[in-house]
Image (spheres, grey):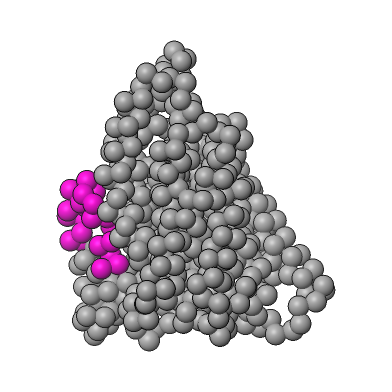
Amino acid sequence: METWTFFIIALGVLLFGFVSEPLQRSVLTPPMVFVGFGYLLGDVLQMGPFTHKVEVIQILAELTLVLVLFTDASTIRLKRLAQMHDLPVRMLVVGLPLTVVTGMVAVRWLFPELGWVEAGLLAAILAPTDAALGQAVVSNLKIPVRVRQTLNVESGLNDGLTLPIVLVLMVIAGAKGGDEAVSFAHWLRFFLTQLLFGPLVGISLSYGAAKLLEWSYAKSWITNSFLRLSALALALIAFSGAELVGGNGLIAAFTAGLTFGNIAHKVRHTLYEFSEAEGQLLTLLTFLVFGAELLPSGLAHIDIWVALYALASLTVVRAGPIALSLIGKRLRWETILFLGWFGPRGVASILFGMMILEETELAATQTIQTLFVTTVSFSIVLHGLTAAPLAELYAGYMARMAHHKTASEKTWVDEMALGIGCRRTDKKRTGAHKAEGRREHERS
Protein backbone atom coordinates (compact mmCIF):
# COMPACT_ATOMS: atom_id res chain seq x y z
CA MET A 1 0.00 0.00 0.00
CA GLU A 2 2.89 2.38 0.77
CA THR A 3 4.30 1.88 -2.72
CA TRP A 4 0.93 2.76 -4.24
CA THR A 5 0.65 5.80 -1.98
CA PHE A 6 4.01 7.22 -3.00
CA PHE A 7 3.22 6.42 -6.62
CA ILE A 8 0.00 8.43 -6.38
CA ILE A 9 1.75 11.36 -4.67
CA ALA A 10 4.46 11.51 -7.34
CA LEU A 11 1.80 11.20 -10.05
CA GLY A 12 -0.14 14.05 -8.47
CA VAL A 13 2.93 16.32 -8.49
CA LEU A 14 3.57 15.43 -12.14
CA LEU A 15 -0.03 16.04 -13.22
CA PHE A 16 -0.17 19.34 -11.36
CA GLY A 17 2.99 20.42 -13.15
CA PHE A 18 1.32 19.87 -16.52
CA VAL A 19 -1.28 22.57 -15.74
CA SER A 20 0.69 24.72 -13.29
CA GLU A 21 0.92 27.73 -15.64
CA PRO A 22 -2.85 28.22 -16.23
CA LEU A 23 -3.56 27.41 -12.57
CA GLN A 24 -1.11 30.14 -11.56
CA ARG A 25 -3.43 32.65 -13.20
CA SER A 26 -6.52 31.27 -11.44
CA VAL A 27 -7.78 31.45 -7.86
CA LEU A 28 -6.86 27.78 -7.36
CA THR A 29 -3.47 28.00 -5.64
CA PRO A 30 -0.92 25.16 -5.24
CA PRO A 31 -1.43 25.01 -1.43
CA MET A 32 -5.19 24.62 -1.94
CA VAL A 33 -4.65 21.82 -4.44
CA PHE A 34 -2.17 19.90 -2.31
CA VAL A 35 -4.11 20.26 0.94
CA GLY A 36 -7.16 18.94 -0.88
CA PHE A 37 -5.07 16.17 -2.44
CA GLY A 38 -3.73 15.18 0.97
CA TYR A 39 -7.21 15.20 2.49
CA LEU A 40 -8.44 12.97 -0.33
CA LEU A 41 -5.62 10.50 0.27
CA GLY A 42 -5.79 10.51 4.05
CA ASP A 43 -9.43 10.85 5.00
CA VAL A 44 -11.43 9.83 1.95
CA LEU A 45 -9.30 7.05 0.46
CA GLN A 46 -7.63 6.11 3.77
CA MET A 47 -4.25 6.15 2.04
CA GLY A 48 -2.53 8.69 4.25
CA PRO A 49 1.03 8.95 2.92
CA PHE A 50 2.65 8.69 6.32
CA THR A 51 -0.04 7.06 8.44
CA HIS A 52 1.60 5.45 11.50
CA LYS A 53 4.95 6.76 10.26
CA VAL A 54 5.40 9.55 12.78
CA GLU A 55 9.18 9.62 12.40
CA VAL A 56 8.84 10.28 8.66
CA ILE A 57 6.53 13.23 9.33
CA GLN A 58 8.97 14.59 11.91
CA ILE A 59 11.92 14.37 9.54
CA LEU A 60 9.99 16.03 6.72
CA ALA A 61 8.71 18.78 9.01
CA GLU A 62 12.12 19.46 10.54
CA LEU A 63 13.91 19.47 7.20
CA THR A 64 11.33 21.78 5.65
CA LEU A 65 11.40 24.17 8.60
CA VAL A 66 15.20 24.37 8.49
CA LEU A 67 15.16 25.19 4.77
CA VAL A 68 12.24 27.63 5.07
CA LEU A 69 14.02 29.56 7.82
CA PHE A 70 17.33 29.54 5.92
CA THR A 71 16.00 30.52 2.49
CA ASP A 72 13.54 33.14 3.80
CA ALA A 73 16.27 34.85 5.82
CA SER A 74 18.70 34.73 2.90
CA THR A 75 16.45 37.00 0.80
CA ILE A 76 16.75 39.89 3.26
CA ARG A 77 19.37 42.58 2.63
CA LEU A 78 20.02 44.18 6.02
CA LYS A 79 21.52 47.36 4.56
CA ARG A 80 18.53 47.93 2.27
CA LEU A 81 16.16 47.00 5.09
CA ALA A 82 17.60 49.70 7.32
CA GLN A 83 17.69 52.34 4.56
CA MET A 84 14.42 51.82 2.68
CA HIS A 85 12.03 49.30 4.17
CA ASP A 86 10.56 51.18 7.10
CA LEU A 87 7.08 49.66 6.72
CA PRO A 88 8.04 46.01 7.27
CA VAL A 89 10.37 47.04 10.09
CA ARG A 90 7.43 48.73 11.82
CA MET A 91 5.24 45.68 11.20
CA LEU A 92 7.90 43.32 12.58
CA VAL A 93 9.07 45.35 15.57
CA VAL A 94 5.65 46.68 16.66
CA GLY A 95 3.00 44.73 14.77
CA LEU A 96 4.36 41.19 15.34
CA PRO A 97 4.56 41.34 19.17
CA LEU A 98 1.17 43.06 19.29
CA THR A 99 -0.28 40.31 17.09
CA VAL A 100 0.96 37.64 19.51
CA VAL A 101 -0.44 39.52 22.51
CA THR A 102 -3.77 40.23 20.79
CA GLY A 103 -4.09 36.62 19.69
CA MET A 104 -3.32 35.41 23.20
CA VAL A 105 -6.02 37.64 24.70
CA ALA A 106 -8.52 36.50 22.07
CA VAL A 107 -7.81 32.84 22.88
CA ARG A 108 -8.25 33.41 26.61
CA TRP A 109 -11.51 35.26 25.99
CA LEU A 110 -13.04 32.60 23.74
CA PHE A 111 -11.43 29.56 25.42
CA PRO A 112 -10.92 30.36 29.11
CA GLU A 113 -10.02 26.73 29.83
CA LEU A 114 -6.65 27.38 28.16
CA GLY A 115 -3.90 28.88 30.29
CA TRP A 116 -2.00 32.01 29.36
CA VAL A 117 1.06 30.01 28.26
CA GLU A 118 -1.03 27.73 26.04
CA ALA A 119 -2.84 30.74 24.62
CA GLY A 120 0.50 32.41 23.94
CA LEU A 121 1.82 29.31 22.18
CA LEU A 122 -1.21 29.21 19.90
CA ALA A 123 -0.93 32.93 19.17
CA ALA A 124 2.80 32.55 18.39
CA ILE A 125 2.10 29.60 16.07
CA LEU A 126 -0.33 31.74 14.08
CA ALA A 127 1.75 34.94 14.02
CA PRO A 128 4.11 34.17 11.06
CA THR A 129 2.82 34.88 7.56
CA ASP A 130 3.45 33.03 4.31
CA ALA A 131 3.93 35.00 1.11
CA ALA A 132 3.48 31.82 -0.96
CA LEU A 133 -0.23 31.77 -0.08
CA GLY A 134 -0.59 35.28 -1.47
CA GLN A 135 1.71 34.79 -4.43
CA ALA A 136 -0.61 36.72 -6.74
CA VAL A 137 -0.04 39.75 -4.51
CA VAL A 138 3.75 39.76 -4.10
CA SER A 139 4.31 38.95 -7.80
CA ASN A 140 1.83 41.50 -9.21
CA LEU A 141 4.07 44.22 -10.64
CA LYS A 142 1.14 46.62 -10.94
CA ILE A 143 1.08 46.93 -7.16
CA PRO A 144 3.52 49.60 -5.88
CA VAL A 145 6.85 48.03 -5.12
CA ARG A 146 6.85 49.47 -1.60
CA VAL A 147 3.63 47.61 -0.75
CA ARG A 148 4.69 44.34 -2.39
CA GLN A 149 8.07 44.35 -0.73
CA THR A 150 6.53 45.14 2.64
CA LEU A 151 4.57 41.87 2.55
CA ASN A 152 7.54 39.97 1.12
CA VAL A 153 10.06 41.19 3.68
CA GLU A 154 7.62 40.72 6.55
CA SER A 155 6.95 37.09 5.63
CA GLY A 156 10.68 36.46 5.17
CA LEU A 157 11.58 37.54 8.68
CA ASN A 158 8.59 36.99 10.95
CA ASP A 159 8.95 33.20 11.17
CA GLY A 160 12.54 33.53 12.43
CA LEU A 161 11.64 36.34 14.82
CA THR A 162 8.68 34.37 16.20
CA LEU A 163 10.78 31.26 16.80
CA PRO A 164 12.43 32.47 20.07
CA ILE A 165 8.97 33.34 21.46
CA VAL A 166 7.77 29.84 20.63
CA LEU A 167 10.84 28.24 22.21
CA VAL A 168 10.56 30.25 25.43
CA LEU A 169 6.86 29.43 25.79
CA MET A 170 7.59 25.76 25.11
CA VAL A 171 10.08 25.73 27.98
CA ILE A 172 7.55 27.38 30.29
CA ALA A 173 4.86 24.92 29.22
CA GLY A 174 7.14 22.03 30.13
CA ALA A 175 8.96 20.68 27.08
CA LYS A 176 9.95 17.02 27.09
CA GLY A 177 13.08 16.57 29.10
CA GLY A 178 12.48 19.84 30.95
CA ASP A 179 10.75 18.60 34.11
CA GLU A 180 12.97 20.56 36.48
CA ALA A 181 11.64 23.66 38.14
CA VAL A 182 12.01 26.79 36.07
CA SER A 183 14.62 28.52 38.22
CA PHE A 184 16.94 31.40 37.41
CA ALA A 185 19.75 28.94 36.72
CA HIS A 186 17.49 27.02 34.33
CA TRP A 187 16.62 30.21 32.41
CA LEU A 188 20.26 31.28 32.30
CA ARG A 189 21.29 27.89 30.93
CA PHE A 190 18.44 28.02 28.39
CA PHE A 191 19.40 31.45 27.06
CA LEU A 192 23.12 30.66 26.94
CA THR A 193 22.66 27.40 25.07
CA GLN A 194 19.51 27.71 22.98
CA LEU A 195 19.33 31.43 22.24
CA LEU A 196 23.04 32.31 22.25
CA PHE A 197 24.91 29.30 20.88
CA GLY A 198 22.43 28.90 18.03
CA PRO A 199 23.07 32.35 16.48
CA LEU A 200 26.81 32.14 17.16
CA VAL A 201 27.11 28.82 15.35
CA GLY A 202 24.85 29.94 12.50
CA ILE A 203 26.68 33.21 11.88
CA SER A 204 30.22 31.84 12.20
CA LEU A 205 29.68 28.75 10.05
CA SER A 206 27.75 30.67 7.40
CA TYR A 207 30.33 33.46 7.20
CA GLY A 208 33.19 31.03 6.70
CA ALA A 209 31.28 28.87 4.22
CA ALA A 210 30.11 31.90 2.22
CA LYS A 211 33.68 33.17 1.83
CA LEU A 212 34.93 29.72 0.81
CA LEU A 213 32.09 29.27 -1.70
CA GLU A 214 32.77 32.64 -3.29
CA TRP A 215 36.49 31.84 -3.50
CA SER A 216 35.78 28.46 -5.10
CA TYR A 217 33.26 30.06 -7.46
CA ALA A 218 35.78 32.71 -8.52
CA LYS A 219 38.31 29.95 -9.24
CA SER A 220 35.67 28.05 -11.29
CA TRP A 221 36.24 25.04 -9.08
CA ILE A 222 32.58 24.44 -8.28
CA THR A 223 29.75 23.59 -10.66
CA ASN A 224 26.35 25.26 -10.53
CA SER A 225 24.65 22.07 -9.38
CA PHE A 226 27.03 21.63 -6.46
CA LEU A 227 26.77 25.33 -5.68
CA ARG A 228 23.05 24.78 -5.06
CA LEU A 229 23.80 21.66 -3.03
CA SER A 230 26.38 23.57 -0.98
CA ALA A 231 23.82 26.16 0.08
CA LEU A 232 21.46 23.34 1.09
CA ALA A 233 24.27 21.60 2.98
CA LEU A 234 25.12 24.83 4.81
CA ALA A 235 21.58 25.08 6.18
CA LEU A 236 21.79 21.51 7.50
CA ILE A 237 25.32 22.00 8.87
CA ALA A 238 24.24 25.11 10.78
CA PHE A 239 21.24 23.24 12.20
CA SER A 240 23.12 20.12 13.25
CA GLY A 241 26.21 22.03 14.36
CA ALA A 242 24.20 24.14 16.79
CA GLU A 243 22.42 21.06 18.13
CA LEU A 244 25.78 19.34 18.74
CA VAL A 245 26.98 22.15 21.03
CA GLY A 246 23.65 22.51 22.82
CA GLY A 247 22.31 25.45 20.82
CA ASN A 248 19.05 25.67 18.93
CA GLY A 249 19.43 24.42 15.37
CA LEU A 250 16.41 26.29 14.01
CA ILE A 251 17.71 29.65 15.20
CA ALA A 252 21.11 28.70 13.77
CA ALA A 253 19.53 27.95 10.39
CA PHE A 254 17.77 31.33 10.36
CA THR A 255 20.86 33.33 11.31
CA ALA A 256 22.95 31.30 8.85
CA GLY A 257 20.58 32.22 6.02
CA LEU A 258 20.61 35.87 7.04
CA THR A 259 24.41 35.87 7.08
CA PHE A 260 24.75 33.96 3.81
CA GLY A 261 22.37 36.29 1.95
CA ASN A 262 24.31 39.37 3.06
CA ILE A 263 27.84 37.98 2.62
CA ALA A 264 27.75 35.68 -0.41
CA HIS A 265 26.86 38.32 -3.01
CA LYS A 266 28.17 36.31 -5.96
CA VAL A 267 26.58 32.93 -5.20
CA ARG A 268 23.37 33.68 -3.29
CA HIS A 269 21.36 33.43 -6.52
CA THR A 270 21.61 29.66 -6.14
CA LEU A 271 19.20 29.85 -3.22
CA TYR A 272 16.52 31.42 -5.41
CA GLU A 273 16.94 28.57 -7.90
CA PHE A 274 16.66 26.07 -5.06
CA SER A 275 13.51 27.78 -3.73
CA GLU A 276 11.82 27.52 -7.12
CA ALA A 277 12.33 23.77 -7.40
CA GLU A 278 13.42 21.58 -4.47
CA GLY A 279 12.24 24.08 -1.86
CA GLN A 280 8.82 24.41 -3.42
CA LEU A 281 8.47 20.63 -3.57
CA LEU A 282 9.12 20.34 0.17
CA THR A 283 6.61 23.13 0.82
CA LEU A 284 3.92 21.42 -1.24
CA LEU A 285 4.60 18.10 0.50
CA THR A 286 4.12 19.91 3.82
CA PHE A 287 0.70 21.09 2.67
CA LEU A 288 -0.09 17.55 1.50
CA VAL A 289 0.84 16.08 4.90
CA PHE A 290 -1.22 18.82 6.56
CA GLY A 291 -4.25 17.80 4.50
CA ALA A 292 -3.73 14.08 5.08
CA GLU A 293 -2.74 13.95 8.75
CA LEU A 294 -3.84 17.14 10.54
CA LEU A 295 -6.89 18.43 8.67
CA PRO A 296 -9.20 15.43 9.37
CA SER A 297 -8.64 15.52 13.14
CA GLY A 298 -8.96 19.31 13.16
CA LEU A 299 -12.23 19.34 11.26
CA ALA A 300 -13.64 16.59 13.47
CA HIS A 301 -13.63 18.95 16.48
CA ILE A 302 -14.56 22.25 14.85
CA ASP A 303 -17.47 24.25 16.29
CA ILE A 304 -18.78 27.81 16.08
CA TRP A 305 -16.26 29.12 18.63
CA VAL A 306 -13.33 27.54 16.82
CA ALA A 307 -14.51 29.04 13.52
CA LEU A 308 -15.00 32.42 15.21
CA TYR A 309 -11.46 32.43 16.55
CA ALA A 310 -10.05 31.37 13.18
CA LEU A 311 -11.81 34.26 11.44
CA ALA A 312 -10.76 36.68 14.19
CA SER A 313 -7.14 35.52 13.91
CA LEU A 314 -7.14 36.26 10.17
CA THR A 315 -8.80 39.66 10.53
CA VAL A 316 -8.86 41.80 13.68
CA VAL A 317 -6.05 39.95 15.50
CA ARG A 318 -3.70 40.85 12.65
CA ALA A 319 -5.23 43.98 11.12
CA GLY A 320 -5.48 45.88 14.42
CA PRO A 321 -1.78 45.55 15.37
CA ILE A 322 -0.71 46.21 11.76
CA ALA A 323 -2.77 49.41 11.68
CA LEU A 324 -1.26 50.55 14.99
CA SER A 325 2.27 49.79 13.80
CA LEU A 326 1.79 51.96 10.69
CA ILE A 327 0.53 55.08 12.46
CA GLY A 328 2.35 58.14 11.15
CA LYS A 329 3.42 56.59 7.82
CA ARG A 330 0.80 58.55 5.82
CA LEU A 331 -0.67 55.45 4.19
CA ARG A 332 -4.21 55.41 2.82
CA TRP A 333 -6.72 53.30 4.70
CA GLU A 334 -7.09 51.04 1.65
CA THR A 335 -3.39 50.21 1.87
CA ILE A 336 -3.55 49.52 5.60
CA LEU A 337 -6.50 47.16 5.08
CA PHE A 338 -4.65 45.51 2.20
CA LEU A 339 -1.54 44.93 4.32
CA GLY A 340 -3.66 43.81 7.26
CA TRP A 341 -5.62 41.25 5.27
CA PHE A 342 -2.72 39.67 3.41
CA GLY A 343 -1.12 37.96 6.34
CA PRO A 344 -1.82 34.35 5.30
CA ARG A 345 -0.86 31.53 7.65
CA GLY A 346 0.95 28.69 5.96
CA VAL A 347 4.09 26.58 6.18
CA ALA A 348 5.66 28.20 9.26
CA SER A 349 2.42 27.90 11.26
CA ILE A 350 2.02 24.26 10.21
CA LEU A 351 5.60 23.39 11.12
CA PHE A 352 5.58 25.31 14.41
CA GLY A 353 2.31 23.59 15.30
CA MET A 354 3.67 20.15 14.51
CA MET A 355 6.80 20.89 16.55
CA ILE A 356 4.80 22.00 19.59
CA LEU A 357 2.39 19.06 19.41
CA GLU A 358 5.30 16.63 19.23
CA GLU A 359 7.71 18.16 21.77
CA THR A 360 5.38 19.45 24.49
CA GLU A 361 2.87 17.72 26.71
CA LEU A 362 -0.11 20.03 27.12
CA ALA A 363 -3.46 19.28 28.72
CA ALA A 364 -5.24 21.15 25.92
CA THR A 365 -3.35 19.62 23.01
CA GLN A 366 -6.51 18.74 21.06
CA THR A 367 -7.95 22.25 21.43
CA ILE A 368 -4.70 23.87 20.29
CA GLN A 369 -4.45 21.50 17.33
CA THR A 370 -8.06 22.15 16.31
CA LEU A 371 -7.62 25.93 16.54
CA PHE A 372 -4.39 26.16 14.56
CA VAL A 373 -5.50 23.61 11.95
CA THR A 374 -8.80 25.42 11.42
CA THR A 375 -7.12 28.83 11.17
CA VAL A 376 -4.54 27.63 8.66
CA SER A 377 -7.25 25.86 6.64
CA PHE A 378 -9.39 29.00 6.52
CA SER A 379 -6.34 31.01 5.49
CA ILE A 380 -5.39 28.64 2.68
CA VAL A 381 -8.88 28.92 1.20
CA LEU A 382 -9.74 32.57 1.90
CA HIS A 383 -6.35 34.08 1.05
CA GLY A 384 -6.02 31.81 -1.95
CA LEU A 385 -9.41 32.85 -3.34
CA THR A 386 -8.91 36.56 -2.69
CA ALA A 387 -5.23 37.04 -3.59
CA ALA A 388 -5.62 37.53 -7.35
CA PRO A 389 -8.88 39.54 -7.43
CA LEU A 390 -7.96 41.83 -4.52
CA ALA A 391 -4.48 42.36 -5.94
CA GLU A 392 -6.02 43.50 -9.22
CA LEU A 393 -8.57 45.65 -7.40
CA TYR A 394 -5.90 47.35 -5.30
CA ALA A 395 -3.60 47.77 -8.33
CA GLY A 396 -6.45 49.46 -10.19
CA TYR A 397 -7.07 51.77 -7.25
CA MET A 398 -3.39 52.75 -7.12
CA ALA A 399 -3.38 53.31 -10.90
CA ARG A 400 -6.25 55.79 -10.50
CA MET A 401 -4.11 57.54 -7.89
CA ALA A 402 -1.36 58.14 -10.46
CA HIS A 403 -1.77 61.92 -10.22
CA HIS A 404 -0.96 61.73 -6.49
CA LYS A 405 2.77 61.35 -7.01
CA THR A 406 3.51 62.19 -3.41
CA ALA A 407 1.44 59.27 -2.08
CA SER A 408 3.43 57.40 0.54
CA GLU A 409 2.73 54.10 -1.20
CA LYS A 410 4.60 55.33 -4.29
CA THR A 411 7.82 56.05 -2.43
CA TRP A 412 10.49 54.12 -4.30
CA VAL A 413 12.21 51.24 -2.53
CA ASP A 414 14.63 48.76 -4.03
CA GLU A 415 13.53 45.20 -4.75
CA MET A 416 14.74 42.53 -2.37
CA ALA A 417 13.76 39.18 -3.87
CA LEU A 418 10.52 37.97 -5.37
CA GLY A 419 8.55 35.40 -3.45
CA ILE A 420 8.97 31.69 -3.79
CA GLY A 421 7.36 30.38 -6.92
CA CYS A 422 7.62 33.56 -9.00
CA ARG A 423 8.28 32.96 -12.66
CA ARG A 424 11.62 33.94 -14.12
CA THR A 425 9.79 36.13 -16.62
CA ASP A 426 8.66 38.20 -13.65
CA LYS A 427 12.27 38.64 -12.61
CA LYS A 428 13.22 39.89 -16.06
CA ARG A 429 10.37 42.37 -16.00
CA THR A 430 11.51 43.60 -12.60
CA GLY A 431 14.54 45.35 -14.14
CA ALA A 432 12.31 47.50 -16.33
CA HIS A 433 9.99 48.04 -13.40
CA LYS A 434 12.89 49.29 -11.27
CA ALA A 435 13.97 51.80 -13.90
CA GLU A 436 10.44 53.10 -14.39
CA GLY A 437 9.95 53.33 -10.63
CA ARG A 438 13.09 55.37 -10.17
CA ARG A 439 12.12 57.72 -12.99
CA GLU A 440 8.68 58.19 -11.45
CA HIS A 441 10.20 58.86 -8.06
CA GLU A 442 12.58 61.43 -9.53
CA ARG A 443 9.71 63.21 -11.35
CA SER A 444 7.73 63.41 -8.13
Which residue: 55% across, 33% down?
329
Please tell me whether residue 276 is drawn above or below residue 177 in the rendered image: above
Q: Nearer the viewer, residue 311 or 359?
A: 311
Please tell me whether residue 391 is drawn above or below residue 59 in the rendered image: above
Which residue: 60% across, 31% down?
83
Q: Is residue 389 left or right of residue 74?
A: left
Q: Nearer the viewer, residue 98 or 169?
A: 98
Which residue: 63% across, 63% down?
165
- Residue 175 visible from this viewpoint: yes
In this view, the residue farthest toward the right is 185
Does the stretch in magenta take in 34?
yes
Majority secondary structure in the magenta region: helix
Q: Is residue 395 left or right of residue 176?
A: left
Which residue: 46% across, 15% down?
444
Residue 355, horizontal then vertical, whole percent:
52, 73
In this view, the residue farthest toward the top is 443
Please tell me whether residue 325 is drawn above or below residue 403 in the rendered image: below
Give the extent of the magenta segment: 14-36
Residue 9, horizontal then vertical, whole percent:
25, 70
Please give the count of numbered marks on the rendered protein.
0
Residue 185, horizontal then vertical, whole percent:
82, 73
Rendered-image quadrant of the N terminus: bottom left
The part of the image, by quadrant, that contains residue 43 is bottom left
